[in-house]
Image (cartoon, rainbow, N blue to C red):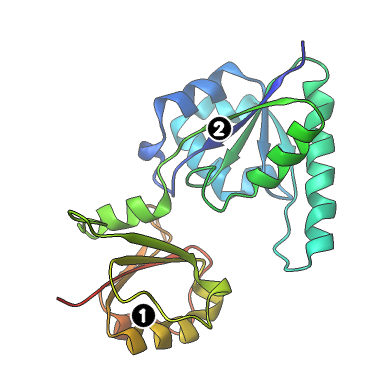
Amino acid sequence: MTGILYGVGVGPGDSELMTLKAVRLIRENEIIALPGAEPRETVAYQIAVCAVPELKDKQLISLHMPMTHDKEEQKKHHRIGANTVEEYLKKGKNVVYLTLGDPTVYSTFTYIQEMVEEDGFRTRLVSGVPSFCAAAARVNMPLSIWNEQIHIFPAVHNLAEDLPSTGTCVLMKSGSKMKQVKEIIKKSGRDAVMVENCGTEKEQVYFHVDEIPDTAGYYSLIITKEVK
């Protein structure tokens, strides 16, 4: 019997937001995969180890996923990661892959999952608190009310588009193109708040688009609402 690859969300940054199921799976399994060249330096590890100190004694494997827009380079590293995981699955061992937020939302785990499934192995997804839900809670704001729609964009890939005229817009992965993102928000006439590094010691909160700096970190999330 081969092992199962679990994609486990550890939430956005606050270890107290990890689910009981995530904690249990880490405790019950010995092989923990992390998306980084040095597992103990990854954000996912630093979140999880606060909730599960036993993680320090687990066998950690590195699945290096460099940030690049080169599709061939991405695919090469995804294949290496899938092959690494499969060596353990063949031996009947489960692998728990820790990923930020929720594994169903813009997660690198998805690429590994697809390859591993194509090779005939089993996978399971374990939900975590998404960053946009945590950010909305941080600023005490409901994401939607009554029939209000929620639009989620990976902002760095949608800089040529106008924002929808109604509903709530969540702009993820905004950091490297923040100046252009701010211009789009101002053009839309919307209100905006930004939470950077939500739930961590480096957290910063900006309550107006004019307060948002032109440069920000990768883990920057903006929530915009139409002015009523």
Residue underneath mark 1: 212
Dot 2 amino acid type: Leu
Name of the residue lying farthest toward the front: 147
Label 2 environment density (alpha carbons within 10 Å; few <14, some 14–19, many ≥20): some
Q: Which residue is mark 2?
A: 125
Q: Is residue 50 left or right of residue 80?
A: left
- Taking the view exactly as shown, the residue that stands out farthest to the top is 1
Mark 2 or 1, which is nearer the eye? Answer: 2
**Residue 67 left/right relative to 8:** right
- Look at label 1 and name its amino acid: Ile
In the image: residue 89, left or right of residue 135 = right
- Does 93 appear above or below 72? above
- Residue 56 lies, with reference to residue 202, above or below; the image says above
Q: Give how far across and how far down residue 97 sits, in percent.
A: 63, 35
Within 10 angstroms of label 1, few (less than 14), some, or many (20 or more) residues? Answer: many
In the figure, 95 relative to 149: above or below?
above
**Quadrant in which residue 83 is drawn:** top right
Query: Is the N terminus in the top left, top right, bottom left or bottom right quadrant?
Result: top right
